[in-house]
Image (cartoon, rainbow, N blue to C red):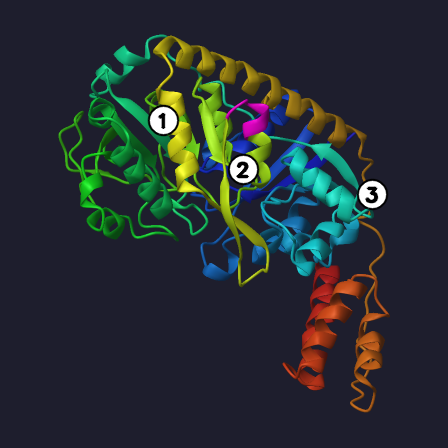
């Protein structure tokens, strides 16, 4: 009997991102079971690194239009013929899976990153096209179930912490061994340099903390930021130049691209000197070539308190990773972050105000800097023994709530109980678009184009096309040509199949 085929569509599992690590942890466990035929579409992958994984990898060409795999997906389906497609990214990224002309041949398990609400209508349409829907958090699952009863929700599949992430026995000595004074107290954060990661706000809040704490604590207190520059977010050099008081108080992670050493230092521009090989080859880590997973052990263990300063998170994997290293956590009290902080008995940062994002109309939360300052002062006033005990409790709660073994057991059960459709070799079926009829009213015009075929999403397509017509964004002939592309694409891949 042939093995069930599972295709992961996401970021390359050998890359350095939250999506990559989540995919790797679960794909590796699936591979070790030996019961499935596995493959992945490796977005942001590297041909020289694809041999790091034992399952099949389809590398995505790095054009802007195809960076998430949309233009590669259908050709991979034809070649691999999966029974199950599995993904866990944003709806605006993964919507092409549900709209594939080959969708009828596979089941789609989808875990969308519901990081803020309300969801855009087109995202809801995309989620509803999945056969099985999971979520990262209880908060997201509750929102979907309360608002969209027709979604086939199957529960949470939260990330966990890797085996390489664990607390050190003597944090003071560990700091000293890594070139940092053992008396230093470090508040740390790990986050992509993206718009929703509130790096400028974090700098402002930390500066406020420095101004309010006593001179003894101020001397020992540092902020460690593990991020990327350049990236799609903030201008780090400008942020630092505008805050000269932070120049010696904010530390950054630099990676040596000659020997892979990791150093922690103040901001020193594009390049820093490696203290291991003495070459000027250290720069900010990149998503496609970042700090190796086992090296992140060092970064987290230098921290005394972890903070997630973000206006929205689908999960916020560094929260769980820091917790697994015995680091108490605090985060903005909104969405997934609120869920995680509650489960880890951490410190919720009060929301100062909500703000709508113009592109999606969803609400983002902006933290109250004074709340963060109060949390830090409260935590740092505790005796070291109490802070250490808090860290150990955080580690135990992380193991209880965010464990890859528990998540894998759920995922394995889901995959094992999905019956393959076995339709990849079924008889081919083709469709021709009705003739163009400009005389029809807008609603009848759209309906007569989309009703004949089940591969078009009736509700979503009708809503979107009527909006285009009613508001004069497009003419009927343009709508006709756009829908015709769906017909042509379907027939093309039906012939390929």
Q: Are marks 2 and 1 in contact (CB under 8 Å)?
A: no
The residue wearing badge 3 is: 421
Q: Which image quarter is the N terminus in?
A: top right
Q: Can residue 369 be seen at all in this image of the molecule?
A: yes
Q: Do the residues labelled 2 and 3 touch (CB within 8 Å)?
A: no
Q: Give the CA separation, mark 3 to mark 1.
A: 58 Å
Is 101 on the left-hand or right-hand side of 453?
A: left
Q: Can residue 48 be seen at all in this image of the molecule?
A: no
Q: Residue 333 carries which label?
A: 2
> Residue 200's spot in the image, x, y percent?
34, 47
The residue wearing badge 1 is: 377
* Camera-side residue of 126 and 119: 119
Residue that appears at 32% across and 22% down: 302
Start-end of magenta stretch? 341-346
Is 209 on the left-hand or right-hand side of 461?
A: left
- In the displayed structure, 349 sits above or below 478; it is above
């Amino acid at each position: 009997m042939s093995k069930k085929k599972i295709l992961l569509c996401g970021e390359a599992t050998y890359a350095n991102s939250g999506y990559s690590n989540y995919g790797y942890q679960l794909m590796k466990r699936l591979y070790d079971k030996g019961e499935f035929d596995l493959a992945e579409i490796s977005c942001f992958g590297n041909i020289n690194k694809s041999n790091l994984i034992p399952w099949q990898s389809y590398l995505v060409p790095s054009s802007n239009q195809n960076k998430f795999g949309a233009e590669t997906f259908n050709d991979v389906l034809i070649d691999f013929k999966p029974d199950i497609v599995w993904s866990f990214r944003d709806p605006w990224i993964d919507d092409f899976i549900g709209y594939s002309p080959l969708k009828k041949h596979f089941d789609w398990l989808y875990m969308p990153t519901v990081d803020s609400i309300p969801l855009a209508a087109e995202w809801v349409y995309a989620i509803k096209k999945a056969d099985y829907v999971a979520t990262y958090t209880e908060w997201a699952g509750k929102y979907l179930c309360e608002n969209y009863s027709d979604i086939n929700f199957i529960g949470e599949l939260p990330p966990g912490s890797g085996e390489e992430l664990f607390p050190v026995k003597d944090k003071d000595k560990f700091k000293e061994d890594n070139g940092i004074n053992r008396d230093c107290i470090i508040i740390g954060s790990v986050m992509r340099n993206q718009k929703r990661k509130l790096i400028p706000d974090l700098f402002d809040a930390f500066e406020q903390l420095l101004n309010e704490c006593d001179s003894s604590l101020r001397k020992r207190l540092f902020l460690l930021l593990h991020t990327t520059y350049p990236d799609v977010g903030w201008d780090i050099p400008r942020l630092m130049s505008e805050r000269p008081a932070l120049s010696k108080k904010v530390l950054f992670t630099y990676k040596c691209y000659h020997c892979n050493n990791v150093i922690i230092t103040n901001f020193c521009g594009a390049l820093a000197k490696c203290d291991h090989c003495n070459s000027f080859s250290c720069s900010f880590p990149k998503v496609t070539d970042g700090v190796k997973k086992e090296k992140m052990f060092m970064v987290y263990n230098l921290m005394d308190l972890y903070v997630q300063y973000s206006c929205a998170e689908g999960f916020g994997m560094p929260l769980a990773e820091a917790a697994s290293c015995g680091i108490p956590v605090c985060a903005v009290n909104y969405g997934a972050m609120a869920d995680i902080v509650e489960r880890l008995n951490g410190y919720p940062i009060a929301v100062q105000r909500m703000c709508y994002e113009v592109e999606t109309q969803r609400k983002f939360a902006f933290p109250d800097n004074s709340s963060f300052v109060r949390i830090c002062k409260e935590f740092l006033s505790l005796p070291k023994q109490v802070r250490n005990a808090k860290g150990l409790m955080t580690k135990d709660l992380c193991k209880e709530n965010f464990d890859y073994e528990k998540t894998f057991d759920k995922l394995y059960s889901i995959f094992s109980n999905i019956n393959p459709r076995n339709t990849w070799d079924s008889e081919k079926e083709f469709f021709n678009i009705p003739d163009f009829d400009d005389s029809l009213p807008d609603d009848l015009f759209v309906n007569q184009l989309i009703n004949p075929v089940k591969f078009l999403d009736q509700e979503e397509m009708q809503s979107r096309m009527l909006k285009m017509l009613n508001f004069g964004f497009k003419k009927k002939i343009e709508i006709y040509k756009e829908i015709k592309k769906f017909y042509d694409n379907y027939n093309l891949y039906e012939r390929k199949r």
